[in-house]
Image (cartoon, grey):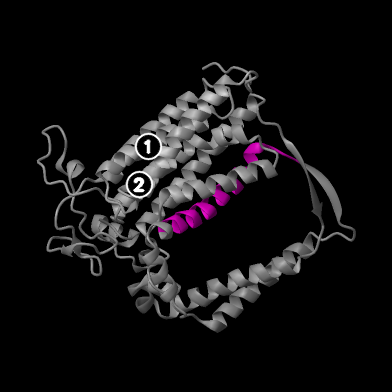
Amino acid sequence: MYPTLYHALLDLTGIDLPGLRFLNSFGFFVALAFLFASWTLGLELRRKEGLGLLQPVMRKVTIGLPASPWELISTGLIGFLIGWKGIHLLLHFEASTADPQGFLLSGQGNFIGGLAVGALLASNKWREKQKARLAEPKTEEVRMQAHEHGGNITMVAALWGLIGAKLFHWLENPDEFVAFIKNPGGDGVFSGLTMYGGLILAGFMVIRYFKKNGIPAWHGMDAAAPGVMLAYGIGRIGCQVSGDGDWGIVNNTPAPSWIPNWLWSYSYPNNVNGVGVPFTGEPCFPGYCTVLPEPVYPTPIYETLMCVGLFFVLWALRKHVTTGGIVFFAFLLFNGIERFFIEKIRVNVPFAGTWTQAEVISLILILVGIAGIVWLRSKKTPDHGPQETD
């Protein structure tokens, strides 16, 4: 396993770049997942625009205003954080990279460096606004296409997805929330994320964004659904590569002849959580040198294969369904089925009796997905758009 990109590069190429210790391998794949989701969303929004399903919206924009106090303060604060941590990192590089997460969450930093960078960025913002300032600011109407919202939609999904993933994890593991409150500088922020928590909260906030910006919610959700399925699968690659604990139950049975041993059961050496017994093999990464005492089902790989396959199903389905919302409800149905059955061989914490939180949520998604498809197809005046030929 490769807890960070530093460990991956070191093992695969022999190149030693300590600065990469700050880049967690799971976080790298999560970022990659959002990039792919944003890309597919943009493609689908453009396609729907071409079919006339999404119309541009006129928005009023005031130009020529000077920099507002909030713009200067927020820019200065961002600059202060960059300078505070960044200058300290440059001056104490080896000590900081020895424990990247501890350094980022600690009170260590360079106060003078923070003030300098904060003042520099705030002054640059002020100068930029002054150059574009008008004696009499004017309000103009700007025509905005749906696909131009793609970046903002992705940012909303990323922010609220991470918040939701952490909140649902704490709901499932309240002892970890208590530990985080007692020690905010520990690993509580970076470890433990519940995918469904992120999916649910991000979904609600993205729908809110659609409605606020004049994008029909059903078609907006249909446009996002395939990319979310793909992002889910890519995110699971991060779980596998880092060994973050999202693995299966113990599997000591011999692998069938048609399946590789690593795909049947795996011991996750050098996992990012440091779970298991001391690892005596090679490579052994300091601080992560453990291995599971018994091999388990590598469930993240299974979920990656299933979700990427389901992405292609949704991507093909989108051109043959013109009723808004069908693709979205199909996504809920497929994702619920996939997760419900993977939970049978996956390690998790009981939430309601013997049921896990993911089993409860996935069952709800299955029922909502079926009900939504039946409801939309039974409407007397379904929202059909123009047919598209392949």
Residue 87 placement, left or right of 156: left
How far across and down, in percent of the image, does residue 295 sit? 16, 51
User: Badge 2: few (under 14), some or many (20 or more) residues near its Cα, within 10 Å?
Assistant: many
Question: CB under 8 Å between callouts 1 and 2?
Answer: yes
Task: Tell me the amino acid under the disc marked 2.
Answer: Arg
Query: Is residue 246 placed above or below 281 in the rendered structure?
Result: above
Residue drawn 57% across and 18% down? Answer: 388
Q: Earlier in the sequence, mark 1 or mark 2?
A: 2
Q: Which residue is nearer to you in this view: 330 or 174?
A: 174
Left or right? Give the position of 366 relative to 121. left
**C-alpha gap between disc 1 and disc 2:** 9 Å
Q: Which residues are magenta?
A: 143-169
Q: Where is residue 165? Give x, y as percent.
A: 45, 54
Instruction: From this view, report whether residue 171 is shown above or below residue 215.
Output: below
Main SS of the magenta segment? Answer: helix
**At label 1, which amino acid type do we have?**
Cys
Q: Please tell me the numbered disc located at residue 307.
A: 1
Q: Which mark is residue 21?
A: none
Quadrant in which residue 119 is drawn: bottom right
